[in-house]
Amino acid sequence: MSAKKVSKYIRQQRRERRRAEKLREREAKQAAKTPKPQRSPRNPQRAGSKKHATAAPALTGSEQTQATGPAPRHGAGAQPSATVHHSADHRHSADHRHSADHQHTASHETPEPTPALERLAAEDSQRAPGSGTRAAAVVVGLGLIAALAGSAGFDLTRSSERAPAGLAAHNISAPAVTERIFCPAMPGQPDSITDQGMLTYAERDPSATSRIDTVMLPTGAETDPVAQWAELSQEGRGSAEDAEPGFTQQNHTEGSVLEIQPPEDPSEDPRARRVTLATGFTYYAESGPLAGLAAAPCTNPQRNHWFLGPEVGSGAMSLLSLANPHDRPATVEITTYDREGDRGSTGATTVLVPEQSVRSVNLAGLTTDSATAVQVHASGAPVAAALQSARTSGQEGLGVELLPAQTSALSHVMPGVLTGADDDAAQLHLYIPGDQQATVELQVFDENSQVPTEAPGVFSAEAGRVAVLDLGGLESGSYDVVVRTDVPSLAAVRSPGDGEPIITDTGGGFDPITGEALPEQSEEDPAPDFSWSASAAALSPGFGALLPRAASPEVDEEAAPEGETAEDGDAVELESQLRLFAPAEEDTPAVVGVNLRLVNTYGTSTEPFTVELTPGAGLTLDAEELAERAEEAEIGEVAAVVVDHAEAPAYGTLITRSEDGRFTATALRPLTRGAQHVPLHIGQ
């Protein structure tokens, strides 16, 4: 059945349900006016079930989607089985060449009478003759978006039997397949780019370096999973080499894909299917047109991506890289929206990304406004998208960033936003997909409480257009930004830095000419840079982030003295601090505890320690405190921060700075991969 027919059928069923509900309401009002004598139920147990069903509200569709748990046990009398089809185009099944579709069949027996069954039977009894019975809609994989895109199927059946129950969601194990994680290519300036996305980079500054770090955490399995790195370029996939815990790949220029193979016999050790790892990409350049610090996690290929705020116009450059690590081609549609709305055909393009290759798009050809939302949709194979953005003045770099992908939601929390640098305020970028105007609530918090800004606290935002607000009136420092809307929205904050001076120890002494004492420390302005903070996800067990580390710059062999071998230069030191924030909601406790662990490059961790947050106030753990905890636990250098537990919704970001004051932000996100399940939903 086509997606259009599915949608039409579901809308019809919803209309019938609403008519039945109105009829029941009228009958209930009529019954209240005419009291009837009480009758003892023939089945006391069933009567109690009906009473419970009246008191307990039914789950909404979104609540059912989020619910998980073991499959319920059913009694005798089998209902028809629900057959589920899901596509190999999902990221966890992308390596299957022999077929694009797989099948899972979930057979359910008729349960004993339950409140849900009683309610559904009552609804069916109210329907008009010939209207048909309720269908069983089975949603597979990552949700309705994938289903409508053709990567999942609906098996809608009509039956003369009683309608299926609206049961809570439960999971079945997905097939163990190869998982791919992609790391972006080293940022660079385009020397030329073709209509097909073939990119040639200009020569990079000698100080520019990039590095990939990966830490595999213990899973409890007897054997480590097999993982391999391979470069992925425009010409295709390079040869693969094994990846070990703590594996580091330095100074690479092409994109890289990490492939994690499923165990040969997962039945012997199911824990081997779970792979917990932290993988991060770091770029740093001290000089040149792309001078700056940027860090980002490596990501899985997906169907849809959203980005906000590419640097375009004079002195700016933004390149969108599309990586397809699968064995079939991908057709990618890129659409841009700015302050005026959809840019139409001038702001859209379609790119074919062959299998096992990378293609690029220069966004300067699609938009002239930095207040732009970029939508990326892939069909065929999913792709990994990375948006490199930079700004220059002549040959001096003013910052570079790998823009984080966005997710539409009603609430956005962006912790650790740096602002207050010479009246260069942070900027909130907001986009409302669809055609419904949004009411927006904006709040900004420091380490004590909510603080006022020059931006309005409540305002309206037009649908389909990008809105930009300056977060002015804030002193230099780190802030937590919360945005709430009444319709789904995209939000991100561009940070110019806090302008804090760089303090250098000079050693003091005396001026040899005047004899005056020299200061023991000197101050200078930080190097120019910018960073982006996207909406973070609420912390859960298995969340975390890798601490960015810079690579050692290469040295020209020809510059070495005669008879000597040139050695690589020293890598710039990077320091990371952890910013945590818990919003103040009605049901939030007075103190929110977050349990954390620090992990080294070999997966060895500290014992969990608790950080207590005051709702509505940010908390910063600086680099020295993180290092002290690692030293006490004798694990050496900290490579990653991992979340064990959070008592209430809380959010976290790593803020990383270089010696010259450049900075970047990395949100804590899920690290656990490979534990793949398919959520099943039976009933409306």
Image (cartoon, rainbow, N blue to C red):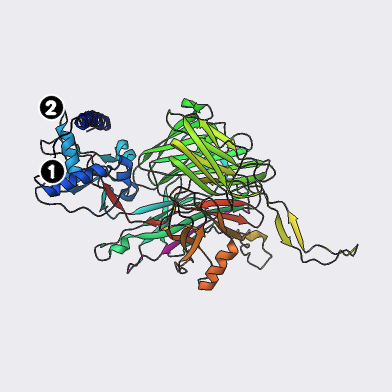
Height in image: 642 above or below 147? Answer: below
Q: Quadrant of residue 623?
A: bottom right
* Snapshot quadrant of residue 117: top left
Q: Secondary structure at mark 2?
A: loop
At mark 1, the secondary structure is: loop
Please tell me which residue is depicted at 64% across the width and 41% down the height of the picture. Answer: 425
Q: Earlier in the sequence, mark 2 or mark 1?
A: 1
The kind of residue tagged 2 is Pro
Give the class, few, some or many, for how many residues have Cα within 10 Å of label 1's Cα (few <14, many ≥20).
Answer: some
For the residue pair 34 and 138, the one nearer the viewer reads as: 34
Q: Is residue 215 magenta?
A: yes
Q: Is residue 103 magenta?
A: no
* Dot 1 amino acid type: Pro
Is residue 111 in view? no
Which stretch is magenta?
A: 206-223
Horizontal and vertical percent for residue 236?
A: 42, 47
Horizontal side of 494 relative to 219 (left or right) equals right
Indicate whether 490 appears above or below 95.
Answer: above
Q: Are marks 2 and 1 in contact (CB under 8 Å)?
A: no
Distance of mark 2 from mark 1, alpha carbons? 23 Å
Front residue of 630 and 86: 630
Q: Which residue is mark 2?
A: 129
Label drawn at residue 15? none
Q: Which residue is mark 1?
A: 80
Q: Position of residue 269 (x, y in %)?
A: 27, 65
Considering every residue shown, the one lying at the far right of the view is 514
Q: Does 314 appear above or below 232?
A: above
Q: Indicate which label's residue lies in the foreground, 2 or 1.
A: 2
Specify the quadrant that holds the N terminus.
top left
Image x and y of residue 528, in percent: 66, 47
Instruction: Evaluate whether residue 257 shows in this view.
Output: yes
Q: Quadrant of residue 556?
A: bottom right
